[in-house]
Image (cartoon, helix red, strand yellow):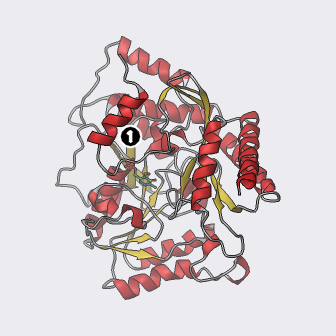
C-alpha cells in the first residue's frame, strides 16, 4: 500500500535531515506526470513550470524515452556496469554531447549529479594548474558537496561547519541590483573588472579556476550580458586559471540559444559542467573539458561507481535526440520570449513586479515592495507561489532572499499553456492586491 500524504510528511519530519525543506505550506504529494503536467495523489493536474528543479527538458515521461527504457528492460540489457567494462551507451551519449561543446573541449566524464561534475572540474583545474584557489561569484550556487559548497555565494547554504576549500568570491554581475550602483548607461563592466581586482587583492596572483553560471539559477535567474563573459575569460586566463562554465541549469537547450549556452555566448571555457535537464530527470551529470586538463590527471585514478550507467546515459542521449528532433530549443526561445513579454505586460498593472529577466525557458521575475527602493517582497513571493498552486500552476522561487519567481517548464511548453501561466499569475497578483 502506498503511503498517505500525512504518513510521508510525518516520517520526513521525524527522520529526514533537519535541513529538509518543502515548497508550499501543505507540501504537494506528486505521483504521476506526463508532458508538461504533473498529478498529485488525488489526481489533480498541475502545469509544471519548474520541472522538479529545472530538470525536465523533453517533457515528463516522454514516449520515446519511455519506449527505450522499456526496450532495454525487455531485452535484459545490463542494468549496471561500470567504466571498468565496455558498454556503448556512455560512448553514444559522449559522441553527441561533444558535438555541442565549445571549441577545443573534447573530453567527457559522466557523474550522477551537478555537484560531482563541478567537484571533478575543480580537481582537474587544480591538477592542471598546480594552483588551489577558485574564484566564484557572490549569489552563485554550484552544489552541495564539500568543494562545491565551499564555492557557494549564498548565506543560506553556509554552515558553521562550512568546508573551507580555498575559494574567493568576486562581485556579482547583477544588473538590476548592481553592486557598484551603476545603470546600463553608466556601466563600464565594473563587475568583470572586479574579478581581476579580486585576484590581485585576495590571492597570491595565480588561480586554479574561475567558476560561473551563464545565468545564475539559484541566484534568481540573473543573466549577465555577453560582454561580461568576454572580459572575464581573458582575466581568468591571464592569471593562469581554467574557466569553468557551470551549465547545470542553463544546459540541455534551456536558454534556446544553443545546447550549451557557453557556445552561444562565445565563452572560451576550459570546462563545462552539466546535470539536471541533461537526463530529463535521470540522475546524470557531465564534466566536459579540454584534453590538456584531462591529461594532467593521467596516472591517477578517478572513478565513480554509477557514473556512465547504461540507463542514465541512454536517457540523456535520447533526451538530446528529442530536443533536436522536436526543435525544442527553438520552442524554448520563442516561448521564453513570449512569457517574458507577457510578464512585462503585467508590470503595467502590478507594481510588485520589479524586473523580468532570464534567457529562453530559464526566466523569472523579481518581486519588490517598491520599484524605487527595490525592497525584497519575500512573503509576497511565497503567497504568489501558493496561489498559483491553488490554480494548478507550479512555479519555483530563488534569489538570495527568495523573492524571485522562477519559471523553467519543460522545453515543450506551448503558447496556450503559456497563456494560462500568464493568466494565472495575473489573477493571483490581482487577488493579492485586494488582500492588502
Ligand atoms: C548551477 C548549479 N550547479 C550545480 C548544482 C548542483 O547540482 P546537483 O544538485 O545535481 O548536485 C546546481 C543545483 O541546483 C545548480 O543549480
How many numbered discs sit on the rendered protein? 1
Mark 1 residue crowding within 10 angstroms, few (<14) / some (14–19) / many (20+): many
* Of residues 431 and 279, the one drawn nearer to the viewer in this rendering: 431
Query: What residue sits 75% from the left and 62% below the top?
Result: 351
Q: Which quadrant holds the C terminus?
A: bottom right
Locate residue 354 relative to residue 228 in the image: left or right.
right
169 with respect to 428 (left or right): left
Is residue 272 visible to us here?
yes
Q: Secondary structure at mark 1?
A: loop
Q: x, y (%) of residue 292?
A: 33, 61
Residue 33 vertical position relative to residue 274 in the rendered view, above or below: above
Quadrant in the picture for residue 84: top left
Q: Looking at this rendering, what residue extends furthest in the top direction? A: 74
Is the residue at mark 1 in contact range of ligand 1, meaning its CB lies under 8 Å from it? no
Image height of 176 relative to 41, above or below: below
For the point 64% across and 61% down, the residue is: 366
Which residue is nearer to you in this view: 315 or 43?
43
Q: Is residue 259 left or right of residue 16?
A: right
Q: Residue furthest bottom?
A: 201
Circle 1 is placed at which residue position?
284
* Residue 17 picture location, percent across and down: 29, 47
Quarter of the figure that contains the N terminus: top left
Q: Residue at x 46, y 45 (%)?
A: 98
Camera sees residue 408: no
Q: From the top left corner, tell me how far across and down residue 207 is, in percent.
A: 34, 76
Nearest to the observer: residue 14 or residue 284 = 14
Q: Which of the 4 quarters of the picture holds residue 209?
A: bottom left
Instruction: Judge left or right: residue 166 versus residue 380.
Output: left
Amino acid at each position: 500500500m502506498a503511503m498517505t500524504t500525512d504518513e510521508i510528511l510525518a516520517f520526513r519530519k521525524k527522520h529526514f535531515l533537519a535541513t529538509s525543506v518543502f515548497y508550499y505550506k501543505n507540501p504537494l504529494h506528486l505521483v504521476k506526470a506526463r508532458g508538461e503536467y504533473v498529478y498529485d495523489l488525488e489526481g489533480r493536474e498541475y502545469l509544471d513550470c519548474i520541472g522538479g528543479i529545472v530538470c525536465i527538458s523533453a517533457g515528463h515521461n516522454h514516449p520515446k524515452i519511455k519506449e527505450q527504457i522499456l526496450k532495454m528492460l525487455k531485452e535484459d540489457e545490463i542494468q549496471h556496469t561500470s567504466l571498468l567494462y565496455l558498454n556503448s551507451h556512455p560512448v553514444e551519449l559522449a559522441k553527441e554531447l561533444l558535438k555541442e561543446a565549445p571549441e577545443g573541449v573534447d573530453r567527457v566524464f559522466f557523474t550522477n549529479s551537478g555537484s560531482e561534475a563541478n567537484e571533478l572540474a575543480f580537481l582537474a583545474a587544480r591538477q592542471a594548474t598546480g594552483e588551489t584557489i577558485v574564484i566564484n561569484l557572490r549569489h552563485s550556487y554550484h552544489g552541495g558537496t564539500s568543494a562545491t559548497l565551499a564555492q557557494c555565494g549564498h548565506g543560506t547554504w553556509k554552515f558553521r561547519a562550512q568546508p573551507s576549500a580555498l575559494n574567493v568570491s568576486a562581485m556579482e554581475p547583477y544588473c538590476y541590483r548592481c553592486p557598484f550602483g551603476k545603470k546600463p548607461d553608466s556601466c563600464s563592466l565594473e563587475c568583470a573588472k572586479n574579478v581581476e581586482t579580486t585576484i590581485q587583492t585576495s590571492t597570491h596572483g595565480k588561480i586554479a579556476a574561475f567558476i560561473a553560471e551563464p545565468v545564475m539559477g539559484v541566484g534568481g535567474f540573473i543573466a549577465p550580458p555577453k560582454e561580461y563573459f568576454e572580459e572575464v575569460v581573458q582575466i581568468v586566463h591571464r592569471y593562469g586559471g581554467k574557466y569553468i562554465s557551470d551549465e547545470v541549469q542553463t544546459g540541455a537547450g534551456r536558454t534556446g540559444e544553443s545546447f550549451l549556452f557557453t557556445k552561444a555566448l562565445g565563452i572560451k571555457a576550459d570546462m563545462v559542467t552539466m546535470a539536471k535537464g541533461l537526463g530529463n530527470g535521470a540522475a546524470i551529470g557531465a564534466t566536459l573539458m579540454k584534453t590538456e586538463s584531462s591529461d594532467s590527471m593521467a596516472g591517477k585514478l578517478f572513478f565513480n561507481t554509477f557514473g556512465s550507467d547504461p540507463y542514465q546515459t541512454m536517457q540523456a542521449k535520447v533526451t538530446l535526440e528529442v530536443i533536436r528532433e522536436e526543435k525544442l530549443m527553438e520552442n524554448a526561445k520563442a516561448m521564453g520570449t513570449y512569457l517574458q513579454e507577457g510578464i512585462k505586460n503585467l508590470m503595467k498593472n502590478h507594481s510588485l513586479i520589479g524586473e523580468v529577466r532570464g534567457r529562453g525557458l530559464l526566466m523569472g521575475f523579481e518581486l519588490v515592495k517598491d520599484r524605487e527602493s527595490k525592497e525584497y517582497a519575500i512573503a509576497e513571493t511565497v503567497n504568489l507561489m501558493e496561489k498559483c498552486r491553488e490554480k494548478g500552476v507550479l512555479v519555483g522561487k530563488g534569489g538570495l532572499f527568495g523573492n524571485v519567481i522562477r519559471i523553467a517548464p519543460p522545453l515543450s511548453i506551448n503558447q496556450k499553456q503559456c497563456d494560462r501561466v500568464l493568466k494565472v499569475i495575473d489573477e493571483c497578483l490581482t487577488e493579492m492586491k485586494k488582500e492588502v
